Amino acid sequence: MIELTQEEWEEQFEPVMDDNDNYKDYHPSCVTEEERLVLKKAISENRVWTLLEDEGLFITNRLRLINRLDVYITNKPYVENEEYYIKM
């Protein structure tokens, strides 16, 4: 497992930001059809991350279902078959 700080994660993977300089949320239940296509492509390119809550908040790579709060896309992909843990 690769552990990163939030700052290290931002620097290394460059999350997509919204107009207010927050991480843009691509939560599957509330995206437009166009964003759904972007999300689908990002999943295939290893650029999707999930904010989870389990004894605290953290981000991990891949699209997760259990304890999911938000879904983010980064400009740079993560290494396939690696697990990442970013404590918030």
Image (spheres, rainbow, N blue to C red):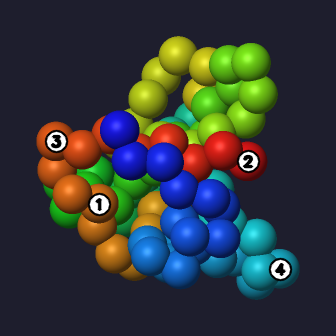
Report the residue marked by disc 4: 20
Q: Residues within 10 Å of mark 4 (few under 14, many from 20)?
A: few
Secondary-structure class at tag 1: loop
User: Looking at numbered disc 1 in the image, what kind of residue is underneath it?
Assistant: Tyr
Secondary-structure class at tag 3: loop
Report the residue marked by disc 3: 81
Q: Viewed as shown, does residue 50 lie left or right of 2?
A: right
Secondary-structure class at tag 4: loop
Report the residue marked by disc 1: 78
| Distance in Å between CA atoms under marks 1 and 3 | 9 Å
Answer with the quarter of the image where residue 44 lies. bottom left
Q: Dots 3 and 2: beta carbons under 8 Å?
A: no
Indicate the position of residue 43 as horizontal and vertical percent values. 28, 51
Report the residue marked by disc 2: 88
Indicate the position of residue 65 as horizontal and vertical percent values. 48, 22
User: Looking at numbered disc 3 in the image, what kind of residue is underneath it?
Assistant: Asn
User: Looking at numbered disc 4 in the image, what kind of residue is underneath it?
Assistant: Asn
The label nearer to you, 4 versus 1, is 1
Indicate the position of residue 50 as horizontal and vertical percent values. 52, 42
